[in-house]
Image (spheres, rainbow, N blue to C red):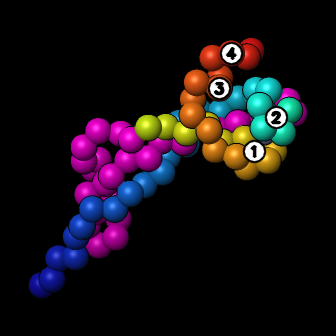
């Protein structure tokens, strides 16, 4: 029997809310995405390996991904 396994990146949405996007200057919804490497078996991610990579805030209005620090300066 063959085992197909490997390490694959997986993006999870960890949080969402509303913010004032500095790119499109619109009050819109955002999602925080966290990318992490997963050990996968038969192409199904089984468990995370390593540390999570830097998370990104994505504006759902213009689609720009930016560092999470943009959320610190607006409410
Ligand atoms: Zn935007």
Q: CA distance from mark 3 to mark 2?
A: 13 Å
The reply to whether the residue tagged 3 has its Cβ within 8 angstroms of ligand 1 is: no
Asked which secondary structure carries label 4, the reply is loop
Asked if disc 2 and disc 1 are in contact, CB closer than 8 Å, the reply is yes
Q: CA distance from mark 2 to mark 1?
A: 7 Å
Q: Which residue is mark 4?
A: 73
Label 4 CA crowd tier, 10 Å (few <14, some 14–19, many 20+): few
The reply to whether the residue tagged 2 has its Cβ within 8 angstroms of ligand 1 is: yes
Foreground label between 1 and 4: 4
In reply to whether residue 42 is colored magenta, the answer given is yes
Q: CA distance from mark 1 to mark 4?
A: 18 Å
Q: Residue at x 44, y 47 (%)?
A: 35
Residue 38 on image: x %, y %: 31, 54
Residue farthest to the right, as pictured: 26
Residue 19 on image: x %, y %: 76, 26
Residue 70: which disc? Answer: 3
Q: Which residue is mark 1?
A: 60
Q: Residue at x 15, y 83 (%)?
A: 2
Relative height, residue 64 to residue 41 (above, below): above
Relative height, residue 29 to residue 37 (above, below): above
Q: Earlier in the sequence, mark 2 or mark 4?
A: 2
Question: Magenta stretch mostly in which secondary structure?
Answer: strand
Query: Magenta span covers which residues?
Result: 26-53
Q: Which residue is mark 2?
A: 28
Residue 66 on image: x %, y %: 62, 38
Foreground label between 3 and 2: 3
């Amino acid at each position: 029997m063959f085992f197909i396994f490997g390490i694959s990146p997986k993006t999870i949405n960890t949080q969402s809310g509303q913010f004032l996007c500095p790119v499109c200057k619109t009050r819109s919804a955002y999602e925080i995405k966290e990318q992490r490497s997963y050990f996968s078996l038969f192409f199904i991610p089984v468990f995370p390996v390593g540390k999570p990579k830097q998370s990104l805030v994505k504006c759902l209005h213009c689609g720009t991904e930016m560092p999470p620090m943009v959320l610190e300066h607006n409410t």
